[in-house]
Image: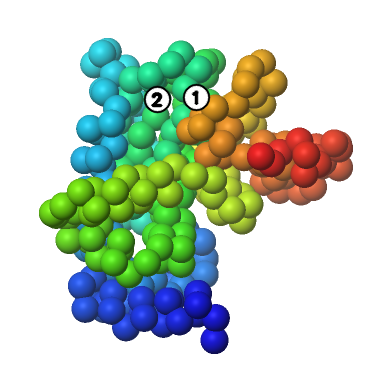
Amino acid sequence: MSRKDIAFAILLLTVPLHFGFMEKGYNKATKKDELIVISTEAEKRMGASIAKQVEKKYKDTDDPLVQKHIEEIGCRIAETCERKDVIYRFKVLKAEKEDDYNAFALPGGYVYIFDALINVMKDDDEIAAILAHEVGHIAAKHSIKRLQSSMGANALMLLGMGMRADSRELVKADYAVNQLMMAYSREAEREADQLSVRYLKNAGFDPNGVVESLEMLKHLRKKGPIRAYTYFRTHPYLSERLANAKSEIKECGDFESYINVTEEDDSF
C-alpha cells in the first residue's frame, strides 16, 4: 500500500468523527453515484471558514449596483441548479490589478468574481456563463472531491472546525485557499461547462454565452503575460473547453472546433 493509500485510509477513519457520517448517494448534477467523505453540514462550515480568509485577503467592490446585479444573475442561475442543500452566495471582489481576470467557487455555495473579469464581459449572458460554471463546480462538489483526495486529515479537520488557534493552523488555512484557487482537472472543467450550458438554458440566458465568454478569455490570454491566480491559471484548457462547450450546445460534435487543440496551447 502506498503512502497516499495509507493517508487516505486514515482519512476515512478519522474524518467522519469530526464531519459526521460519510455520504454516498446519487448526485443529480453529475448523474453519478458518489462517495463523499465530508458531510454537507461540514462542507458549509468549511466554506464559511475559507470565505472569511478570502474576504480578509480581498476587498469587496466599491460599486453596490454591480454587486446587486451579480447577485440577481447568480440567483437566477442557482434556481435552476439541481443542488438545493446549500445557499448560494455571490460576491464581487475588487481586483488588485486591472487584469486579474478570475472567478472561483468555495465549498458550501460561495461564488466569487473579480470586477476586472466582469468589466471585460460584453453582456449578461457571458457573465451568467462565468457564474454558472462556478455554480456547476459547487453542484458537482468538485472542490470537496479534490480536498478529500489531496489534503491531509488534519487540514480537513481544521477547516471543518472553523480554523481555530495558532499560526501553524493559519498557514494550513491559507494553503486551503490556495488549493481551491488552483486548476481543476480536465474532467471537472468539462463537467462544469456542461452544467453551465444547462443552467443558462434553464435560466433563460443564451447558452452561447458560454462559448462567447471562453472566446473572450482566450483573446485576453493572448494579449498579455499570465500571472498566478488569473482565470487562465485556475481555468486552463481554453481551446479544449471551447470545443466541448460548442459540442454541448449543438448536442453533436463539431470537427472544426477541435482543430489546433493542443497540449501546448492549453496547459501551463
Quadrant of the rendered image containing residue 216: top right
**Disc marking residue 64:** none
Question: What's under tag 1, amino acid-wise?
Answer: Tyr
Locate residue 185 relative to residue 267 in the image: left or right: left
> Going 54% across and 27% down the picture, which residue do you hit?
227
> Going 17% across and 61% down the picture, which residue do you hit?
161
Instruction: Please say whether residue 22 is visible from this viewpoint.
Output: yes
Crowding near pointer 2: few (<14 within 10 Å), some, many (20+)? Answer: many
Find the distance from the CA under tag 1 to the CA under tag 2.
7 Å
**Disc marking residue 101:** 1
Question: What's under tag 2, amino acid-wise?
Answer: Phe
- Residue 151 locus on image (x, y percent): 40, 63
> Going 30% across and 61% down the picture, which residue do you hit?
155
Locate residue 42 relative to residue 206 in the image: left or right: left
Q: Which residue lies furthest to the bottom in this view?
A: 1
Q: In this view, does 165 lie above or below 239?
A: below
Dividing the image into 4 quarters, which one contains the N terminus? Answer: bottom right
Instruction: Please say whether residue 78 is visible from this viewpoint.
Output: no
| Residue at the disc numbered 2 | 114
Locate residue 231 relative to residue 78 in the image: left or right: right
Q: Do the residues labelled 1 and 2 touch (CB within 8 Å)?
A: yes
Tag 1 secondary structure: loop
Q: In this view, does 172 lie above or below 245?
A: below
Crowding near pointer 1: few (<14 within 10 Å), some, many (20+)? Answer: many
Tag 2 secondary structure: strand
Dividing the image into 4 quarters, which one contains the C terminus? Answer: top right
- Residue 128 locus on image (x, y percent): 46, 31
> Going 46% across and 48% down the picture, which residue do you hit?
136
Quadrant of the rendered image containing residue 44: bottom left
Question: Quick one: 175 or 213, which is closer to the camera?
Answer: 175
